[in-house]
Image (cartoon, rainbow, N blue to C red):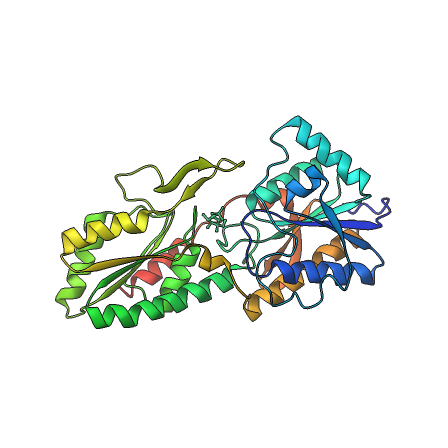
Amino acid sequence: MADTTRKIKTIGILTGGGDCPGLNAVIRAVVKTAHLYDYSVIGIRNGWKGIVEGEVEPLTEFSVTGILPKGGTILGTSRTNPLKSQEQTQQMLSNLKRFGIDAVVAVGGDDTLSVATRLHQMNIPVVGIPKTIDNDLSGTDYTFGFDTAVSIVTDAIDRLHTTAESHHRIMVLEVMGRHAGWIATIAGIAGGADQILIPEVPFDIDDVCEGLKKRRERGKKFSIVVIAEGAKPTDMNTFVTASSKVDEFGHEQLGGIGHLLGRAIEERVGSETRVTVLGHVQRGGSPTAHDRVLATRYGVKAVQQIHEGNYGVMVALHGDKIVPIPLSDAITQKKVDPELYEMARIFY
Ligand code: F6P
């Protein structure tokens, strides 16, 4: 139900969680659309941390000039959870008042948007925009940042092919994807991977090795295995982590499954094996045209929701339309479609 009783003068915008290409395109779109409606815009620095600590800056047309093709976020980001303590929550609420922020545009993944959902429940006007290279947010067909990450990974697979072929090696490529293997699956299909391993489907190391041996017996002298960082062998029920630290939302830093698999392959298959961990390269650099346009459409639609008094929503891509959906429907995880994953297996 639209709430047209509130008089909105100032919109606050923040980018939270892991950065991704397209964030600046959203910020630009929000600022330019807001100005059309005569709203002023305040940039909240470093995600929710900025509003807790009172770090904000006015965003003008000048601040967003030239940022459309730039990766990262001019506002900075963090994985701060302002709901972790009552004191921080209170500080956030009083700073929203202090800076005259009447409505918040929260650009983020499930963690950032779960905080936005709580703000909505506290009667703060808020609109969410789905961002993550992982594409694992339900409620939207695609998050922005994903297409760019897929392009980077596909390029990496192409490059690994030429060196793998020259040396007759098996190449293991570890990519991002904590709970969902969208990047591994889509880039794996695009790059012609010979095995794709994702968090949704635990894998048997013996089966993977058997598959690679059979491929070699068919005369294929090299193979490319793409594995998501969150993938697990059937006999392990914890993630392979790079550090024991957890962030404020309780997430571990993943990394290492590629090396574990690479060692097992070399031992059991007997082919020389090398491992590449692509890491944050996947999140860096300029967004693709697709992500620039998607991010821009999300930014425009978010401000339109505020203008219409439609709060507590996330703007989502449904087919080729951008539509508002309740924030609460957006924050569950979207797993790789099993049909798509099965289709990828036709090729190996
Ligand atoms: O959420 C996006 C993501 O890139 C995940 O795929 C990955 O596990 C995580 O962020 C890495 O986070 P950080 O930048 O904190 O290392």
118 to 164, vertically: above or below: above
The residue nearer to you, when weighing 261 against 63, is 63
The residue nearer to you, when weighing 266 against 305, is 266
Please indicate whether residue 253 sits to the left or right of residue 224 in the image: right
Q: Residue at image x 18%, y 64%?
A: 215
Q: Position of residue 137 (x, y in %)?
A: 53, 50
Image quadrant where one finds the C terminus: bottom left
Q: Position of residue 209 (x, y in %)?
A: 19, 54
Q: Residue at image x 80%, y 38%?
A: 97
Q: Position of residue 334 (x, y in %)?
A: 49, 49
| Rendered image quadrant of residue 170 | bottom left
Q: Residue at image x 29%, y 38%?
A: 236
Please indicate whether residue 139 sits to the left or right of residue 253 in the image: right
Please indicate whether residue 253 sits to the left or right of residue 262 in the image: right
Please indicate whether residue 256 sits to the left or right of residue 110 in the image: left
Q: Position of residue 237 (x, y in %)?
A: 32, 37
Image quadrant where one finds the N terminus: top right
